[in-house]
Amino acid sequence: MKIGIISFTARGTRLCCHLASRLSGGVDECTAFVPERYSDTYDKTGDMEGVVRCQDMPLGQWTKTMFLEQRAMVFVGAVGIAVRAIAPFVRDKMTDPPVVVVDEAGRFSIPILSGHVGGANALASRIGECIGAVPVITTATDVNGLFAVDVFAAENGLVLTDREAAKQVSARILDGGNVGFFNEFEGGEPGVPRGCCKNPSEYNIWVTVKDSSLEFERSVGAVGSLHVLRLIPQAVVAGVGCRRGVEPFILERQVLEGFRKHGIDPASVKALATIDIKKEEPALLALAQKRGWTLRFYSAAELGDVGGTFTESAFVEQTVGIGNVCERACMAEGGRLLFGKEAGGGVTVAAAVEPFKLDIEKYI
């Protein structure tokens, strides 16, 4: 997490620098932005070098910059200052960065924006541990000690597919009703989250790579009109083969068509895999960059070592040294084949799903 901490008074500046020093000692990138007139209140050498910067822009401009950079913000001062500063830039709870306010005496740490999805609640608690402040958490599920599906999704790297469904699930749990919890990747998890059950209910959570909730009833044996919130893990590897110089739009179209045909949500894809002689293929590079997918390349020998029964082609073997690229590439790290070779437009596509384990124990 990238964090910007800002102060406005001499006392606040001392706390701001101390907090920045503590937080930057972990895995975070943390910068303290302090008024130049209070530069004599902190040590500019040693551990503070590179952590503290003089704040030389209007507060509104600084706040806009933090939003654009998706930095978490910590205001050392009054809540009102922070609220007025962020108000013009607040757009969406799913994308807004987390904002926390700490009073300059260091007594309270108050998340005021993106408490769950953005992680402001967790940041406020960490700040409390650093300086002995009391985290003031006001989100309903936290106050009541209940399961928060948006936090669970964020901490497990799951994509929330439907915000309205997420609200309905949370409301159901807050009202004391049961929510069904189903996981396609189940394999030794100790149970289900608080407020959830293993039986289909009116409202359900489904951890899946499927692109539609229509499959839910068939998958779990449920009958009736049910509300389903899909949580999508990034666990799918797309294996591809292509002719040299294939147009980027054709490659993307064929890959997405394979997912659509077999009911796989593109949000579940984490990597694009192929043979190493395609390392410089522009269409592959462009698709991976556009979609944020990792690229995996394997030699013909490595692909030949992948176990399984694959659709082989004598022409492909003569051309690249192995009879099937797409199926072997998506299976190179193990997992389960979701669909075999689909060909069209000079492109072959296959997909596999790799093992995925939820961190669920603390939610039980």
Image (cartoon, grey):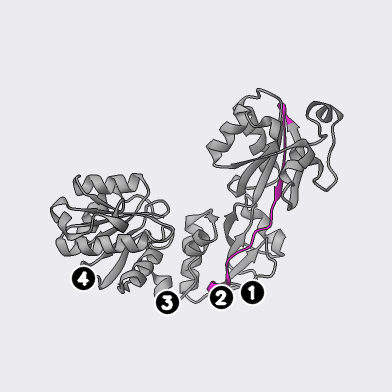
Q: Is residue 19 left or right of residue 12?
A: right
Quarter of the image with the N terminus in it: bottom left
Residue 190 has which mark?
1
Residue 60 has which mark?
none
Q: Measure the alpha-carbon separation of dots 4 and 3.
A: 28 Å
Type of amino acid at the residue the image marks with label 3: Asn
Q: Residue at x 31, y 74 (%)?
A: 132
Query: Could you tell me if the residues under marks 2 and 3 are in contact, i.e. CB atoms within 8 Å?
Result: no
* Residue at mark 4: 105
- SS category of the residue bearing label 2: loop
Q: Measure the alpha-carbon separation of dots 2 and 4.
A: 36 Å
* Residue at mark 2: 364
Looking at this view, is 208 or 44 the one in front? 44
Q: Measure the alpha-carbon separation of dots 1 and 2.
A: 8 Å
- Sequence-wise, the earlier of marks 4 and 3 is 4
Instruction: Tell me the magenta residue range.
Output: 344-364
Q: Residues within 10 Å of mark 4 (few under 14, many from 20)?
A: few
Question: Eyeballing the image, is 149 above or below 234?
Answer: below
Q: Is residue 71 magenta?
A: no
Q: Measure the alpha-carbon separation of dots 2 and 3.
A: 14 Å
